[in-house]
Amino acid sequence: MWLYHGNSLELLDAIAAKYPEGRFDCIFADPPYFLSNGGITCHAGKMVKVDKGDWDKSRGPELNHEFNLEWLRRCQRVLKPNGTIWVSGTLHVIFSIGYAMQQLGFKILNDITWEKPNPPPNLSCRYFTHSTETVLWAAKNEKSKHCFNYDLMRQTNGGKQMKTVWTMTAPSGNEKSFGKHPTQKPVTLVERCVLASTNEGDFVLDPFLGGGTTAVAAIRNGRHCVGIEADAEHIALSVARVRSESRGPGNLFAPKTKDAAAIL
């Protein structure tokens, strides 16, 4: 388990330089959605502003897309030849992600709809209630022979083929016991992605680690994990969750330069 405190683009460049043939079997990425625009939403029964931080503010569609191209390009480099990537997002970002994947030559395998059974109400009453997010699953390129644990997914789904609509609740209070990240994903969601596309002992990367959910999912299922997070408070939250999950300090690192790749 390696947790980096630093810039994703710089660290991914360093890892790619050391492992030109790729390092990771799977990537789970929950990038900025660029939706902190001064709007409102409902949280805990109260009206609150949609302001998750400067990292989530839109810089305009062209610059947002350029950013998505750059981090996806680097993720593609560090994937092994048969590796896959999962990217979650709302309507604010997911269309750019899908287009960028096509531009870079990824092979899009599925678009998963994560349905939230109890979403916050739409306070403006001018739109349908937002109750889903999309998770795109893609292979490194058209030649990739991607891993898909079909039998396990069928078993998980009561003996039937698993469809692309997954109904799961938002993170429980227990998952936020050490603090919460504004776009935190439920462990069950990330676990399903990891179990579907990797085998025990594989290496998983999360370039936007946030509150550490991917690291927790990896620990629970016997996968190695590398997480990168730029925000100091969020990396501290990830460390706390990982230590609790592993019942020990583990191998935790927080380098700030490209030399971080030396520990992998």
Image (cartoon, rainbow, N blue to C red):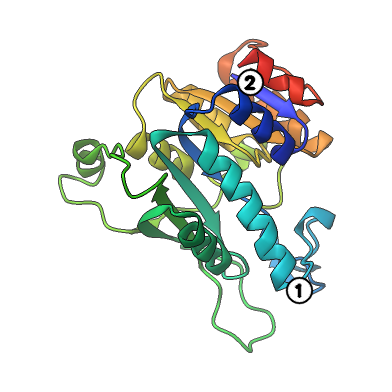
**x 24%, y 46%: residue:** 157
Q: Residue at x 49, y 63 (%)?
A: 98
Distance between the Cα atoms at labels 2 and 1? Answer: 36 Å
| Of the image marks 2 and 1, the number of the one nearer the N terminus | 2
Q: Position of residue 184 (x, y in %)?
A: 63, 47
Give whichever of 109, 180 is nearer the camera: 109
- Quarter of the figure with residue 175: top right
The amino acid marked with disc number 2 is Trp
Secondary structure at badge 1 equals strand
Disc number at residue 191?
none
**Residue 227, visible in the rendered structure:** yes
Query: Residue 246 placed where, x, y %?
Result: 57, 16
Q: Which mark is residue 40?
A: 1
Query: Label 2 neighbourhood size at 10 Å, few (<14), some (14-19), many (20+)?
Result: some
Which quadrant of the figure contains the C terminus? top right
Q: Residue 123: x percent and y percent? A: 68, 79
Q: Nearer the viewer, residue 59 or 142?
A: 142
Q: What label does residue 2 carry, if any?
A: 2
In the drawing, does residue 10 fall left or right of residue 216? right
Kind of residue indicated by mark 1: Ile
Q: Is residue 116 something that shows in the picture?
A: no
Residue at the image point whose x is 66% and y is 13% from the top: 263
Q: Are marks 2 and 1 in contact (CB under 8 Å)?
A: no
Q: Position of residue 5 (x, y in %)?
A: 77, 29
Look at the picture and state if 116 lies above or below 192.
below
Of 238 and 13, the residue lying toward us: 13
Q: Quadrant of the N terminus?
A: top right
Residue 147 location, quadrant: top left
For disc 1, the neighbor class at 10 Å (few under 14, some 14 to 19, many from 20) is some
- Vertical side of 37 occupied by 25: above or below: above
Q: Is residue 49 left or right of residue 12?
A: right
